[in-house]
Image (cartoon, helix red, strand yellow):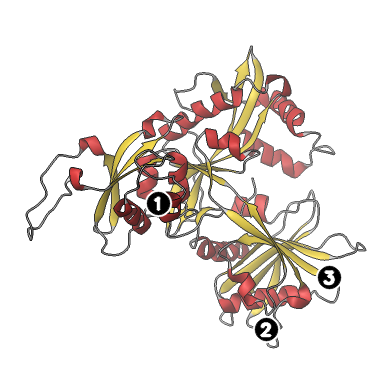
Amino acid sequence: MSTSTPVSFTLRDSKLFRHVRPLGPDDYEAWDDLLVSSYGDPGPPVPDWRDEEHREVVNYAYGLYVDGRLAATTVVRPIRLVHGERLIPGTLITAVATHPEHRRCGHAATMFRELLEVIRESRHHISILYPFSFAFYRKLGWEHVADFVSYEIPLSALPPVEAMPGRTRTVARGRPRERVQVDKVDVERLDDVYRRYARRYSGMIERDDAWWRRRVLRAGKELTHTALWEDAGGRPGAYAVYSMGPMGTYPKDITVRELAAVSSEARRGILGFLKGHEAQFLNLKVNLPLADPLVFCLDNPRVERKLLARHMLRLVDVPAALEAMAEPEPGFEAGVVLSVSDPVCPWNEGDWLVEARQGRVTVRPAASWPVRPVAPTGAASTEFALASLPRVELNVTALAQITGGFLSPESAAEMAKLGASAGGEAAQDPAATAILAKLFGRRPSYVFDAF
């Protein structure tokens, strides 16, 4: 998997803009004022390290104007998302804001409807965001696809490590308002761990050197430490990005921003390093995916855990997204017709033939498939007969949960999200449900990054 994130300006060059346009340098002051009006005072004067970040972010900022005044804005950043061994072109949505005097007028919805068309034109198949309101974004076609577990674990409860496997060293420290100092080789070793860990999930953001330095390793309000675990042969296998709070404050906890380990030995090593702080610190606080095995490392799993909703996913281009996210079981060949409803993105509406053959999945409009009779018994058939294929109706939000590994097709059917009339009481087709289960949802969705 490549470690370079492509920078694309195709979103800015689109000819589809009508009410929305990219922001330029002359819009910076109005953009900053709108963000302050929406989110409140950011605090002391902007430090130097944020100047660079602001210049980078404004390249991906878009605004909707009313009577010549910026009324709503968002940042749509092109990225690539890890899906097993694949990288899927997508976008992350952030910094969504509407000026208070323009709220409840539908401006944000108008902005997103237009941007979704532009995103599709630029061939970014999916989009992720952290919602201020699940209901608001659900109406626009995004859907909740991930939860995380927030742990608070006494350091004394971490497993004892009598003989520390491998070694753990501090590779970076970031102080507030200062550039993080870290060797390029160490960034590459951290990224090696991250990439192997990310392959277990769907949706992790591909990172480059700048992303690591500006977003992951830098300090927030407190000094941030980064520790890297390496095995006896020197290969990296785990890392932790964490802070310990200011000196002299009590109770003292270690707050972990990111914790990734790719083997049981690596997990024991990095947890043993964190446990080594127990003479001065009480608890370990960390957020992890549901599927992370941390809890199985504890002798006593009765620790404080909170289940919280994570991010939302949008299938911007249904056929392209399905082809990119499908993972058929080896040797599995079948076809199913998906009748997709998407009131926001009309190009996704309609019947799609999803065909698995020779290890890959193709998706095309069902109307383009020739009507052929079923092959005689015992005869080799090179094509599926469309009329004989199982069929299921669902909306684009249910499809996002299934492809994102958050909701199994069986559970979706049980919740009446699948059927002859999605959300209704019509009978579902068990054959269609079984095929979907063999094509999608083999890995859960998760995103480490906050944006």
Residue 320 percent across, percent down from the top left: 36, 43
Residue 44 visible within the image: yes
Q: Residue at x 52, y 33 (%)?
A: 140
SS at circle 3: loop
Residue 112 location in percent, x, y? 54, 29
The amino acid beneath tag 2 is Met
Q: Quadrant of residue 60?
A: top right
Q: How many marks?
A: 3
Going from the N terminus, do you reach mark 1 or mark 3 first?
3
Q: Using the image, tell me which numbered label, if any, was put on residue 325.
A: 1
**Amino acid type, residue under disc 1 in the picture:** Met
Please, is residue 70 above or below residue 382 in the view? above
Give the mark nearest the N terminus, 3 or 2.
2
- What residue sits right under mark 3 in the picture? 281
Label 3 environment density (alpha carbons within 10 Å; few <14, some 14–19, many ≥20): some
User: Which is nearer the eye, 128 or 163?
Assistant: 128
> Residue 192: x percent and y percent?
54, 65
Dividing the picture into quadrants, the one containing residue 92 is: top right
Above or below, comparing residue 434 to residue 10 in the picture:
below
Q: Residues within 10 Å of mark 1 (few under 14, many from 20)?
A: many
Q: Is residue 354 above or below residue 59?
A: below
Among numbered discs 1 and 2, the one appearing first in the sequence = 2
> Badge 2 is on which residue?
164
User: What x and y, as percent, mark residue 248?
Assistant: 93, 63
Q: CA distance from mark 1 to mark 3?
A: 43 Å
Residue drawn 49% across the image and 36% down it: 141
